[in-house]
Image (cartoon, rainbow, N blue to C red):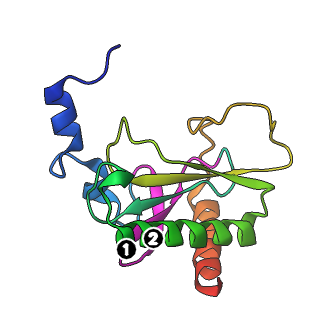
């Protein structure tokens, strides 16, 4: 399939058509649960926990590309990514966290934080669609609460 048509891309890239603008601030949405919101971002724990601790940091302001951010907004975004990573490290103790910034399907600046654990194959390509491993609501809530406590402590 070729790249999006100009019309499709304009629709996807607009704030009005942006799914992340619609629900990133909600306590829960079909994809994730809210850990915290800062002045710059929303930090969310993915419902798909194929990689324990998989989370996202989503820029509050609708921007399509990191190049669209001024220096202060860029610094604030990456500070929140780092703090989310420290929270993941505190709760899930991964060996490494991979940071994925893409946006060709959902053109809104966001970063996937995909923890890699000792049982993961370090030579396998990263795939955010692994699983899905969908936890029962109690376990997901417990993980989210642990992430909230870690966020406050780091």
Dot 1 falls on a residue whose secondary structure is: helix
User: Which quarter of the rendering shows the C terminus?
Assistant: bottom right
Between the residue at mark 2 and the residue at mark 1, the CA separation in whole angstroms equals 5 Å
Decide: few, some or many residues near mark 2? Use Cα within 10 Å; few <14, some 14-19, many ≥20: few
- Please state the extent of the stretch shown in magenta in the rendering: 30-49
**Local crowd at mark 1 within 10 Å, few (<14), some, or many (≥20)?**
few
In the image, residue 14 sits, relative to residue 137, either above or below, namely: above
> Which quadrant holds residue 120?
top right
Q: Residue drawn at (79%, 32%), measured in percent from left and top? A: 123
Q: Outermost residue, front direction? A: 71
Percent of width and height locating residue 77? 44, 67
Q: Is residue 16 magenta?
A: no
Question: Residue extending furthest right?
Answer: 118
Q: Which residue is mark 2?
A: 75
Estimate the x, y position of residue 86 in percent, counting from the top left: 67, 71
Rendering coords of residue 41 (x, y %)? 40, 69
Residue farthest bottom in this picture: 153
Identified at 33% across, 50% down, the residue is 108
Between 59 and 72, the residue placed more toward the observer is: 72
Q: Residue at x 32, y 15 (%)?
A: 2
Q: Nearer the viewer, residue 74 or 25?
A: 74
Q: Which mark is residue 72?
A: 1
Disc 2 + disc 1, Cβ < 8 Å: yes
Q: Main secondary structure of the magenta part?
A: strand
Is 36 in the magenta? yes
- Answer above or below: position of 138 versus 9: below
Give the residue at x 73% y 72%: 90
């Amino acid at each position: 399939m070729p790249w999006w048509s100009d019309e499709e891309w304009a629709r996807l890239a607009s704030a009005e058509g942006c799914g992340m603008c619609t629900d990133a601030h909600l306590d829960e949405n079909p994809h994730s649960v809210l850990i915290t919101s800062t002045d710059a971002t929303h930090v969310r724990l993915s419902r798909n926990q194929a990689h324990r601790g998989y989370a996202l940091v989503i820029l509050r302001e609708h921007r399509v590309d990191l190049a669209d951010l001024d220096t202060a907004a860029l610094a604030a975004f990456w500070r929140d990514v780092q703090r989310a990573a420290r929270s993941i490290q505190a709760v899930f103790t991964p060996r490494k966290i991979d940071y994925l910034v893409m946006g060709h399907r959902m053109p809104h600046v966001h970063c996937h934080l995909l923890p890699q654990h000792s049982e993961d194959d370090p030579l396998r390509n990263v795939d955010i669609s692994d699983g899905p491993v969908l936890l029962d609501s109690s376990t997901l809530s417990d993980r989210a609460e642990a992430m909230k406590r870690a966020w406050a402590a780091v």
